[in-house]
Image (tube, rainbow, N blue to C red):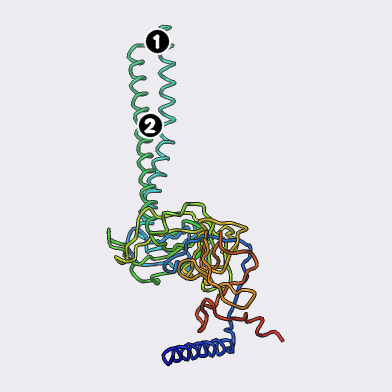
Amino acid sequence: MRPRLLGWLALILALAAGALLLWRFAQQPPVRVSVAAVDEGPVETTVANTRAGSVSACRRARLATPVGGRIEVLAVREGQRVRRGQLLLQLWNEDLVARERVAREALAAAQSRIAEVCPLADNAAREVERARRLRAQGFFSEDRLDRAESEARVRAAACDSARAQASEAEARVRAALADTARTVLRAPFDGIVAEVNGEVGEFLTPSPPGIPTLPAVDLIDDSCLYVSAPIDEVDAARLAVGMPARITLDAFRGRHFAGRLRRIAPYVTAIEKQARTVEVEVEFVAPGEARHLLVGYSADIEIVVEAREKALRVPTPALMPGNRVLVLGAGGRLEERRVETGLANWEYTEVRAGLSAGERIVTSLERTGVAPGARAIAEENARAP
């Protein structure tokens, strides 16, 4: 009888202890949690850059004269807008200008020589025709006809020689103009001067082959801008030219610019062995929005790989490993549930199965006490009077 009595006593004590624990657990206040309702809305699968990109210009020319020399005229300054063909810089070229003047004088002399001898050649040719007609009628001797023909040939040769000298003089003028043009730098397109390296009186040296040097003038066409940024090589295979994109800039926080993928580099860049990326270019859909942007701005891109306008979705931060979520039930208990997901990005994830519209899921997973089975209360309800 004594062992049986002890057994019943132990059982009674265990039941009492369990009842005490349940009572104390029931007296604990519910955990306050942040919740979000499962709703319908757009969901996208996107690809973002791995490092910050930058705003670049469609056309940018780092200009320098092909010959060296002393800077005689510096017609622009940094930040100035220029038109195509406008003078930017000119080297000292008085010697070349003088040679050009000599060539033009030689051309003028050759043209005067043509005006002098060619009419005589034409007249001599007409005299030969008249002499031949008279010789046929017997009024002209053979000797006089031979002299007339010889005179015509001499006059024609003199005319041809004068024309050849004029052609040579024209070629010398073109060569002199080309030499002079090599000392003058003009804008190849409309744009803004980003950088000027040199001052009046300084000697400008052209870049030797294979050795880049600072440009004399850095000209940017800021009427056409795009963003260049690196994408992880794993994501590059999912991209295609023409995909829509969003552009964000640190200088314009909270604002998005519509973009379109215009180029995918045909090679992988390996800055580090563990960071292999593919450079992509995203153009602005509305170029007018980009006119006030500066080349070199830091920028990020988000390329939309796939999108669904009406999808059942949940905030992506609410997902736990294994595609699990905590649902706040009507009784105030947290219930763990596994869901089937679809499209996803950093903001929203599509739910294909496991949840219904209107159910509330926990987004504050990092808080103490948030676990399956725990009593919880949504923060908006906790603040209600």
User: Between marks 1 and 2, how big is the CA–CA gap?
Assistant: 27 Å
* Image location (x, y in percent) of residue 295: 48, 67
Label total for image = 2
The residue located at (40%, 33%) in the rendering is 117
Rate crowding at label 2 as few (under 14), some (14 to 19) or many (20 or more) other CA atoms within 10 Å: many
In terms of depth relative to the viewer, which is nearer, 361 or 20?
20
**Considering the image in quadrants, where does the N terminus appear?**
bottom left
Name the residue rendered at 41%, 63% in the picture.
Answer: 230
Residue at image mark 1: 135
- Front position in the image: 142 or 154: 154
Label drawn at residue 159: 2
Under circle 2, the secondary element is: helix
Vertical placement of residue 250 versus 269, above or below: below
Furthest-right residue in this view? 385
Residue 154 placement (x, y as % from top left): 33, 27
Of the image marks 1 and 2, the number of the one nearer the N terminus: 1
Q: Kindly tell me whether residue 6 is visible in this rendering.
A: yes
> In the rendered view of the protein, which quadrant contains the C terminus?
bottom right
Residue neighbourhood size for the residue with mark 1, other residues' Cα within 10 Å, grouped as few (<14), some (14–19), many (≥20): some
- The residue type indicated by label 1 comes to Arg
* Kind of residue indicated by mark 2: Cys
- Pick the residue in front: 103 or 378: 378
- Tell me: 27 left or right of 107: right
Q: Can residue 224 be seen in this view?
A: no
Against 276, residue 12 (above or below) is below
Image position, residue 59 (x, y; %): 46, 58
Secondary structure beneath dot 1 equals helix
Which residue reaches farthest top? 137
Seen in the image, is 176 located left or right of residue 309? left
- Residue at 48% over, 54% down: 262
Closer to the camera in the image, 1 or 315: 1
